[in-house]
């Protein structure tokens, strides 16, 4: 009798929040600078969730991390998580983000504050799909498949909507497709670490 076991499953947690018009207006008015990955702009403030205006959203972010860490990964209750960095990303027409992951963090995520359909899907990449890798390269065989499933798919695409909150392991590679609208899109990205692993004096909790 055969048995197939998903030995290294990768969870993606999706929640949905209400985004006020005041918050949408606020993120349009803050200061931005060019990003260093892909193109677009990110907020000068790289600890945006520490602001009073984001107090409720920050708690929702930490709650999503608790859902994923304790409900899925079964992390012990004595581990407390804190937001280490957070910023707003602004994408105008044609802006995108190249494939990357978030080193130096444990959990990461994105909250879509204001996005229209076609504003740029987020794509999660399966670098282990039917291939091999080591420190210097990755080999993936270009087979044709009858259909795709969680074992053989090279990527998983999520069409974002305003208010969607995604939380995932920081090591998962992801990218953002180009914004094909003339309407600017705004999202909030964050990184999270266990409180025991950071210099708590540098973080407002």
Image (cartoon, rainbow, N blue to C red):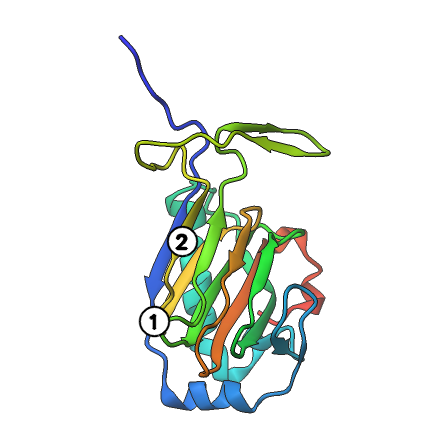
Image coords of residue 116 (percent x, y)? 37, 76
Crowding at label 1, few (<14), some or many (≥20) Cα neighbours within 10 Å? some
Q: Which residue is mark 2?
A: 157
- In the image, residue 90 sits, relative to residue 28, either above or below, namely above
Can see residue 178? yes
Q: Which mark is residue 197?
A: none
Image coords of residue 185 (percent x, y)? 47, 77
Q: Is residue 160 left or right of residue 127?
A: left
Image coords of residue 190 (percent x, y)? 55, 64
| Residue at screen point 45% across, 67% down | 120
Crowding at label 2, few (<14), some or many (≥20) Cα neighbours within 10 Å? some
Sooner in the amino-acid sequence: mark 2 or mark 1: 1
- What whole-number distance in Å separates the C-alpha atoms at marks 2 and 1? 20 Å
The N terminus sits in image quarter: top left
Q: Which residue is mark 1?
A: 17
Q: Is residue 179 left or right of residue 36?
A: left
- In the image, residue 29 sits, relative to residue 170, either above or below, namely below
| Residue at screen point 43% across, 54% down | 66
Outermost residue on the left side: it is 1
Disc 1 element: loop
Frontmost of labels 2 and 1 is 2
Image coords of residue 198 (percent x, y)? 68, 56
User: 29 and 117: which one is in front?
Assistant: 117
Q: Is residue 107 left or right of residue 152?
A: right
Disc 2 element: strand
The C terminus sits in image quarter: bottom right
Can see residue 67? no
User: 84 and 166: which one is in front?
Assistant: 166
Quarter location, residue 36: bottom right
User: 183 and 74: which one is in front?
Assistant: 183
């Amino acid at each position: 009798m055969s048995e197939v076991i998903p030995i290294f499953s990768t969870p993606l947690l999706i929640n949905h929040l209400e985004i006020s018009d005041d918050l949408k207006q606020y993120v349009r008015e803050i200061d931005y600078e060019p990003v260093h990955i892909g193109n677009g702009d990110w907020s000068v403030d790289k600890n945006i969730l520490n602001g009073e205006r984001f107090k409720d959203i920050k708690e929702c972010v930490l709650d999503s991390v608790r859902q994923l860490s304790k409900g899925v990964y079964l992390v012990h209750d004595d581990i407390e998580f804190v937001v280490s960095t957070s910023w707003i990303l602004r994408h105008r027409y044609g802006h995108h983000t190249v494939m990357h992951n978030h080193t130096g963090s444990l959990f990461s995520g994105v909250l879509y504050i204001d996005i229209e359909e076609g504003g740029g899907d987020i794509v999660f990449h399966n670098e282990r799909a039917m291939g091999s890798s080591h420190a210097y390269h990755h080999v993936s065989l270009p087979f044709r498949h009858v259909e795709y499933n969680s074992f053989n798919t090279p990527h998983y695409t999520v069409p974002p909507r305003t208010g969607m909150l995604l939380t995932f392991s920081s090591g998962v590679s992801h990218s953002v497709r180009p914004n094909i609208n003339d309407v600017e899109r705004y999202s909030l990205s964050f990184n999270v670490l266990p409180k025991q692993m950071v210099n708590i004096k540098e973080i407002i909790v």
